[in-house]
Amino acid sequence: MAQLIADRRDVDFVLNEQIQMIEHEKFAEFNKKTCDLIISEARNLAIKEILPTFKDGDETGCTLENGKVTVPESFQRAWKLYCEGEWLAMCDDPEVGGQGMPKLLGSAALEYMVGANPSFMLYYGMTHGAAKLVEAFGTEKQKKLYMKKMFAGTWGGTMLLTEPEAGSDVGALTTRAIKKPDGTYSIQGSKIFISAGDHDLCDNIIHPVLARIDGAPAGTKGISLFLVPKYHVNDDGSLGEFNHVVCTGLEHKMGLHGNSTASLSLGEKGECIGTLLGEENKGMPEMFKMMNEARAFVGMQGFASASASYMYALEYARTRVQGRHLLAGKDPEAKDVTIINHPDVKRQLLNMKAYTEGMRSLIYYYGKCSDIVATTEDEPLKQNMAALIEVLTPIVKGYVTDKALEVCSHGVQVYGGYGYICEYPVEQLMRDCRIFMIYEGTNGIQAMDLIGRKLSMNKGQSFQYFMDQMKKTIDDAKNIPGIEVLVQKVTHAVSRLEDLARIIGQRTRSENVLNAYAFAHPFLEITGDVTFAWMHLWRASIAAPKLMEKAGSLESKLIEQKAAKNKDIAFYAGQMASAKFFIHTLLPAAYGKMDAIIEADTCVEDISDVCFGSK
């Protein structure tokens, strides 16, 4: 089952040949041998302990009875082993119980675990994000009481933003915070769609809650952030009484049944007490620290689901015998072949492969950017890389999850009728994957963030730095024989994106602002397409010399003969195939979208409500 979560050879390629970990004393102990061992251990845990919870979590789901939320029984053992291995804080400081891994390495470990069961790993995602908020903004007392137990997984965490009437408009929230004489706050309100909102994996759950202090300004400017534990925590760290955080219901969802998506009532039947986290009226910028991490994690969830779906579909296509080869003609002696020999199945698998590999490169690169920020003493580089992370975030969250659903849909299609039934895992992966386009700000919001904030951030210098990284790869690739056409096409794509970014950026600051936002999502798609072309050119620039070294040629027929006997040749030939397919076949679709944005048709802003149809 190992190969049915992620392609280990490709994981190693990105880690050791493409992205590569930075050399710094902070990560001195993480040499190649250690990293290989960590990835192997993560894969073993994922396959042996987390993967068996995948189907069980879907079929059993979570239950709410007599006020108590219960997760599937199989989750208990997996969570215990996951926490005992100290995986929850693998990239965090050893002082808080972490292992101090580079985030690049952590991304590879996470891919296996999330791919094994994304609903199980949501408990990790919410807990880790909440713990990082305490680390960033907590008082010394709050850190002492909460951090280590959260990073250890003994206590869980959540993120309480969404309300029934507010939705994505967080500034419209109505949850109140009433200051008490002792400096604590009485919290009153209701929250919905809370992932891991209540469960029995942990002794306590710490809820970061957005609320408005009585008398604070309206909108997002008047929102503060509070820590609200499910059970009060005494000064010695022991648990006190119930804090009146009541689970009023669990959502019945399309997928991710193993994760408890809860509705929570705060203080309705008693006094719910919270403590201020950070500063008054600074709740939104503080929460964005968690949300940016959460958005990157949602991208990881989409990617890992897509990777798993691809590996399942590939295995199925290699073993499912059906239909004769098209070249067999009318030969009565011709035997049926495995479906991977049929052109349309090959096309779908290559589509899945190209997108999955692009996702892996981008998400690992995103992790490395964080490692550079954490270690460099070059202040301009630190600022540029931090800004690059900001620019990449809507692509990692929005574009990746859009394409992840597409990949999972192909997975179902490759299986044919079997893909549509619950006997095989690809239908569940597709259901689970659909929510990631909505989580942590819909992909429409990610697109608006890209054109509304990221294009103009630092007077446009941050987006330009992003473009410059692409150009650097292009310049390096120009000297590599055999990929000249790929270089030419990616150069053209980057140049057109650069021009388009200037056009749509100007439009956001003009009287045509509605038109700009009508094309925000197509612009996100275009940016993602060009980013993946960049990643594939980068891959090809490594694979082409390796093929020349090992096969002595880049000619397809010669490589095909040798690839059957040499796994390295087969792998690098596969890299070239992915790059060519993406850049020659998938990337050109972006040019039509570019033309549409430049044309600036006004149908979206012009159409009125009544024209959509009668009630």
Image (cartoon, rainbow, N blue to C red):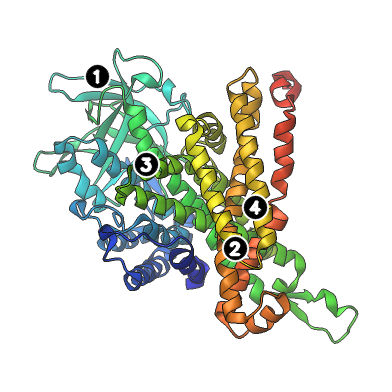
The disc, 4 or 3, on the residue closer to the chain's N-terminal end is 3
For this view, does 312 lie left or right of residue 298? right
Q: Say the numbered circle drawn on residue 380.
A: 3
Using the numbered discs, state the Cα–Cα distance from disc 2 to disc 1 in whole angstroms.
65 Å
Residue on which the image places disc 1 = 178
Of labels 2 and 1, earlier in sequence is 1
Q: Are marks 4 and 3 in contact (CB under 8 Å)?
A: no
Q: Upstream in the sequence, badge 1 or badge 3?
A: 1
Question: Where's residue 106, x and y in %?
Answer: 37, 58
Of helix, strand and loop, which one carries label 3?
helix
Of the two numbered discs 2 and 1 in the rendering, the one whose residue sits closer to the viewer: 2
Marks 4/2: CA distance? Answer: 15 Å
Residue at x-position 46% and y-position 69%: 12
| Neighbourhood count class around disc 1 (C-alpha, 10 Å): few under 14, some 14–19, many 20 upward | some
| Residue type, label 4 | Val
Q: Which residue is mark 2?
A: 479
